Image (tube, grey):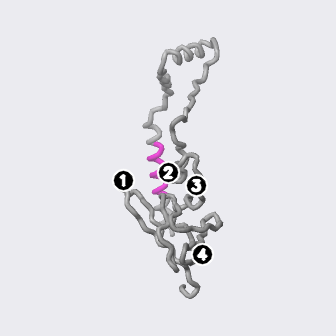
Amino acid sequence: MKLRTATLAVVLGASLLSMDSYAQEREPVRPEAQPQPAVQNAAAQSAVQNAAAGEGKVEKEVYIYNPSGRRDPLLSIITASREVETRRGRPGEFTPPTEDYDVSQFNLIAIIWAKAESHALVGLPDGKYYTLKKGLRAGINEGKVIQILPDSVIIREFVKDYKGKTTAKDTTLKLRKEEEK
């Protein structure tokens, strides 16, 4: 125990002496002159000189952003491009709600099968239901209902791939049966 106490006292004494000698070797800190900020234009330079002389107020330079012709930088690029695609324009023509959503978001509820003309009842993400028949436009990619079968509906869309090439894409909406899980 005495050995530990003696060792601790020696270590503390040595560290205090080294700190004291370090403090004596350092030179006192001299305050340096602060550099003057660089002035960019003549008007700002004269304003700084007037302010230094106490002649008047320094006017604050105001920047005004003009967003005309530019997209909102705070909106998602994907959301902005989908809005453009959804509302692509057939001016003066009514666009049904079935063209506001992607075909993969449709939920096939029922099919009315008739010899003359068949209809399909689909549910959209907005919670509303609409009927589709052969030849009706559906989806945001200008798709059309090409066939209504007893258990499914086939919709053909024309989509652009990453190279810009337009290809036909068939989407099959299947009627969900209660037995299948």
Residue at mark 1 to residue at mark 3: CA–CA distance: 25 Å
Q: Which residues are magenta?
A: 9-20
Residue 81 is tagged as: 2
Q: Amino acid at mark 4?
A: Ile
Q: Amino acid at mark 3?
A: Thr
Q: Earlier in the sequence, mark 1 or mark 4?
A: 4
Q: Earlier in the sequence, mark 1 or mark 3?
A: 3
Please tell me which residue lies in front, 121 or 16. Answer: 121
**Tag 3's secondary structure?**
loop
**Residue 145 image point, x, y percent:** 50, 66
From the image, give the main secondary structure of the stretch colored magenta.
Answer: helix
Residue at mark 1 to residue at mark 2: CA–CA distance: 15 Å
Give the class, few, some or many, for how many residues have Cα within 10 Å of label 4's Cα (few <14, many ≥20): some
**Residue 168 image point, x, y percent:** 39, 63
Residue underneath mark 4: 109
Task: Say which of marks 3 and 2 sits in front.
Answer: 3
Residue 164 is tagged as: 1
Residue at the image position 48 percent from the left and 61 percent from the top: 143
Q: Earlier in the sequence, mark 4 or mark 2?
A: 2
**Residue 70 image point, x, y percent:** 51, 38
Please tell me which residue lies in front, 120 or 49. Answer: 120
**Residue 50 image point, x, y percent:** 58, 13
Q: Amino acid at mark 1?
A: Gly
Q: Earlier in the sequence, mark 1 or mark 2?
A: 2
Residue at mark 3 to residue at mark 2: CA–CA distance: 18 Å
Q: Residue furthest bottom?
A: 179
Please tell me which residue lies in front, 69 or 95. Answer: 95
Residue underneath mark 3: 95
Residue 96 is inside the magenta segment: no
